Image (tube, helix red, strand yellow):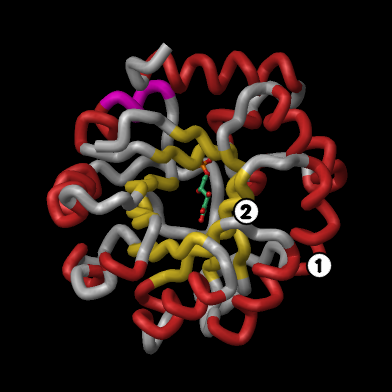
């Protein structure tokens, strides 16, 4: 496992009326990455934002902008997200017909490439693209909404993905229901990169965000 643990607040749980300020606040409070939840109302039953909003908030933080595209198709929009300032772009195996091609396209745009799988998708869906990715995202809730409960059956899958990754320099990210009462088991299963929305943004101010991320790191055994 990569030694360093990454906490990536999901801005889905932030106050969208002050999105730039909310990103700057978690940056100052100690976020490692900023996680951008892009939803299309088609692949997932919710709609969030697209490249113009990413470009508008890019100046709010210099941290790694980690875009999770919950959109189908994704290919027509990859360049726009890269130009908007995303550092990493993750596409869903379920939403991408030619996954190998999409991942090559992301790297050709100069971004880190990620592949995500939903809770009901077997890890075999990614076995032939592992040399094309910098990140694997195991969804631990069904994508579309923040504040859902962690799906425990994904723990075994996280362990199997960790074994598949082996020595490759690939981050193993989890997203959904990550909180102080779940992160310990998730770390033990093999993840190193944690998206957390409601567990970070609860409290509504920078001091709370710092305390919330400290609590996650402590529960993960990393503080
Ligand atoms: O991708 C997502 C939903 O599709 C969110 O990032 C995720 O659900 C985070 O929210 P929470 O930490 O509140 O579960």
In the image: residue 35, left or right of residue 120: right
The answer to whether residue 86 shows anywhere in this view is yes
Q: Which of 106 and 125 is in front in this view?
A: 106
The residue that mark 1 highlights is 52
Asked whether residue 162 is drawn in magenta, I would say no
Q: What stretch is highlighted in magenta?
A: 180-184
| Percent position of residue 181, x then y | 36, 23
The residue that mark 2 highlights is 36
Q: Which of 126 and 15 is in front in this view?
A: 126
| Percent position of residue 193, x then y | 41, 40
Q: Work out whether 28 lies above or below 161.
A: above
Cα–Cα gap, marks 2 and 1: 13 Å
Q: Work out whether 207 lies above or below 92.
A: above
Circles 2 and 1: CB atoms closer than 8 Å: no
**Residue 83, numbered label:** none
Say whether disc 2 or disc 1 marks the residue closer to the N-terminus. Answer: 2
Residue at the (28%, 34%) spot, across then down: 186
Helix, strand or loop under label 2: strand
Q: Which of 114 and 36 is in front in this view?
A: 114
Residue at the (43%, 47%) spot, across then down: 175
Residue at the (71%, 15%) spot, across then down: 207
Residue at the (41%, 58%) spot, across then down: 142
In the image: residue 122, left or right of residue 170: left
Report whether the residue tagged 1 is closer than 8 Å to ligand 1: no
Classed neighbour count for the residue bearing mark 2: other residues with Cα under 10 Å, few (<14), some (14–19), many (≥20): many
Task: Name the dominant secondary structure of the magenta segment.
Answer: loop
The answer to whether residue 157 shows anywhere in this view is no
| Percent position of residue 32, x then y | 56, 34
């Amino acid at each position: 496992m990569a030694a360093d643990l990454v906490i990536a607040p999901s801005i889905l749980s932030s106050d969208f009326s002050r999105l730039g300020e909310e990103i700057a606040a978690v940056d100052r409070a100690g976020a490692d990455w900023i996680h951008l939840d892009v939803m299309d109302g088609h692949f997932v039953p919710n709609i969030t934002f697209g490249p113009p909003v990413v470009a508008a908030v890019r100046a709010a933080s210099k941290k790694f902008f980690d875009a999770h595209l919950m959109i189908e198709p994704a290919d027509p929009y990859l360049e726009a997200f890269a130009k908007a300032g995303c550092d990493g772009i993750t596409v869903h195996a379920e939403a991408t017909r030619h996954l190998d091609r999409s991942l090559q396209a992301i790297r050709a745009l100069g971004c880190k490439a990620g592949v995500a799988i939903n809770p009901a998708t077997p890890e075999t869906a990614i076995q032939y693209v592992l040399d094309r990715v910098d990140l694997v995202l195991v969804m631990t809730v069904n994508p579309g909404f923040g504040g859902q409960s962690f799906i425990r059956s994904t723990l075994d899958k996280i362990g199997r993905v960790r074994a598949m990754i082996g020595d490759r320099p690939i981050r193993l990210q989890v997203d959904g229901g990550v909180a102080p009462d779940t992160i310990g088991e998730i770390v033990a299963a093999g993840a190193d990169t944690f998206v957390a929305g409601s567990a970070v943004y609860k409290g509504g101010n920078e001091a709370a965000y710092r305390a919330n991320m400290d609590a996650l790191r402590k529960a993960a055994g990393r503080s």
